Amino acid sequence: MIVTTKIALAGEGGQGVQSVAEILAEAANQEGREAIYIPNFGVEQRGGVSIAFVQISDETIGSPKFKTADIVIALSGRSIPRTAQYVDGNTVFVYDAAIKEHLDALPKHAKKVLSIPALEVAKNELNPRVFNVIILGAVIAATNVITIDQAKAAIEAKLGHKFAQKPELRDLNYRALERGAELVQEAE
C-alpha cells in the first residue's frame, strides 16, 4: 500500500517552521522517497504567519498542493485559524501549549487535537534555540513519516559544520528531537 503523508506547519517568522519542513523533506529524499516542500512565507517579516507544506510518499507525488493535511502543527496563536482550512476528520492537529490566543479556533472536527509543551521544554530543559527541533521530533512521532535516525542524519547534513565547531550542539539537537517525540507520546 502506497502512503502519502501531507504535513502543514505554521508559526510566526523565525520559529523555524521552514527549517523543520526542509529537514523532513531532505531526510525522506535521503532514504529514496519522494518529498516535496513548499514554503509560504507570507509577510512574516512584518509579523505574518509562515506556513510550510510537505508531502512525503513512496511514489511520485502528482500535485504539490493538497486540500487537507494528515497532520497540522501550529506554533503560534495566529497560525491556528490560518491552518483551519487544512483540517478534516482524518487530521491530527498539534499545537504548542504556550499558545493562549485563538484557542477558540482549534478545530473541533479533527481526528485528534494534541497540546504539547514544546516551548516550555525548550526554555526549561534544553535551550530555546532548539524549539524547532523539538517540533520536528513531534512531527516524526505523530506521523512515523521518517525515523528519528533519518532525521538525525538530515540534521547532521544541514548543521554538521556547526557541530564541528561546537560538538555539544549535536547532542543538544539530538536530545531535542527525541524529547519532541516523547511529548507527542505523552499527549496521546
Image (tube, grey):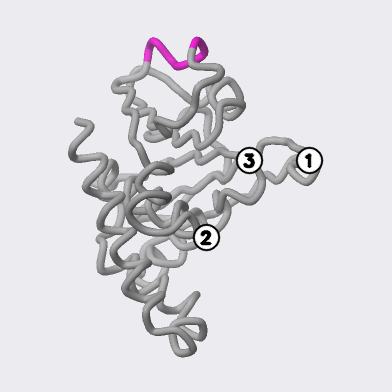
In terms of secondary structure, what is the magenta stretch mainly?
A: loop
Neighbor class of circle 1 (other Cα within 10 Å; few <14, some 14-19, many 20+) is few
- Is 177 above or below relative to 138? below
Residue 36: give x, y in percent of width and height: 52, 55
Frontmost residue, 7 versus 19? 19
- Amino acid at dot 3: Glu
Read off the residue under disc 1: 43
**Lower sequence index among marks 1 and 3:** 3
Query: Helix or strand or loop: what does disc 3 sit on?
Result: strand
Read off the residue under disc 2: 22
Q: Within the magenta stretch, is there residue 108?
A: yes
Read off the residue under disc 3: 12
Question: Between marks 2 and 1, how big is the CA–CA gap?
Answer: 19 Å
| Residue extent of the magenta highlight | 104-109
The residue lying at 34 percent from left, 65 percent from top is 151
The residue positioned farthest toward the front in the image shown: 124
Question: Between marks 1 and 3, how big is the CA–CA gap?
Answer: 10 Å
Q: Within the magenta stretch, is there residue 85?
A: no
- Amino acid at dot 1: Val
Query: Helix or strand or loop: what does disc 1 sit on?
Result: loop
Q: Is residue 99 left or right of residue 143?
A: right
Residue 106: give x, y in percent of width and height: 46, 16
